[in-house]
Image (cartoon, rainbow, N blue to C red):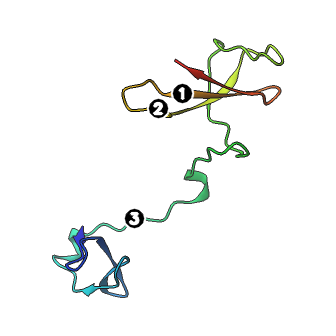
Amino acid sequence: MQFCDECGSMIKKQDGVMVCSNCGYKAEQKGDSEDFISTTEQTGDELIETSEDANFEGKPTDESVHCDECGNGKAWYTIKQTGSADEPPTRFFKCTECGNRWRDYN
């Protein structure tokens, strides 16, 4: 990994030259090209959608949940830290049958 001498941001290789995406500074690559590992871009399959209207359903639960709308005992869930770091995370559920959404504050 190489950092910009001007602003300190991480720089990446473009057309054989190391270029800062923040300020545009250009530099020669330090070290051998074998020292650098290129990663591929993420595909849409690897991304996790978390908005209310997202198609991603989350992780499946066991049968310990109960939907108040239809009585179903299975739901999808995601976990988010909605409070401060010393508070437990919030679990967001979506019923596998009717799509009802609710949350649980452990």
Q: Which residue is under mark 3? A: 39
In this orientation, which residue lies closer to the viewer: 101 or 36?
101
Q: Amino acid at mark 2?
A: Gly
Q: Reading the chain from its start, which is encountered first: label 2 or label 3?
A: 3
Residue sitting at x 26%, y 69%: 36
Q: CA distance from mark 3 to mark 1?
A: 33 Å
Is there CB contact under 8 Å for labels 2 and 1?
Answer: yes
- Which image quarter is the N terminus in? bottom left
Query: Which is in the foreground here, disc 2 or disc 1?
Result: 2
Q: Amino acid at mark 3?
A: Thr
Q: Secondary structure at mark 2?
A: loop
Q: Which residue is under mark 2? A: 83
Total marks placed: 3
Q: Reading the chain from its start, which is encountered first: label 3 or label 1?
A: 3
Query: Which is in the foreground here, disc 2 or disc 3?
Result: 2
In this orientation, which residue lies closer to the viewer: 82 or 53?
82
Percent x, y of residue 60:
63, 27
Percent x, y of residue 4:
24, 76
Q: Which quarter of the figure has residue 58?
A: top right
Percent x, y of residue 33:
23, 76
Residue sitting at x 47%, y 34%: 81
Q: Which residue is under mark 1? A: 90
Residue sitting at x 79%, y 31%: 99
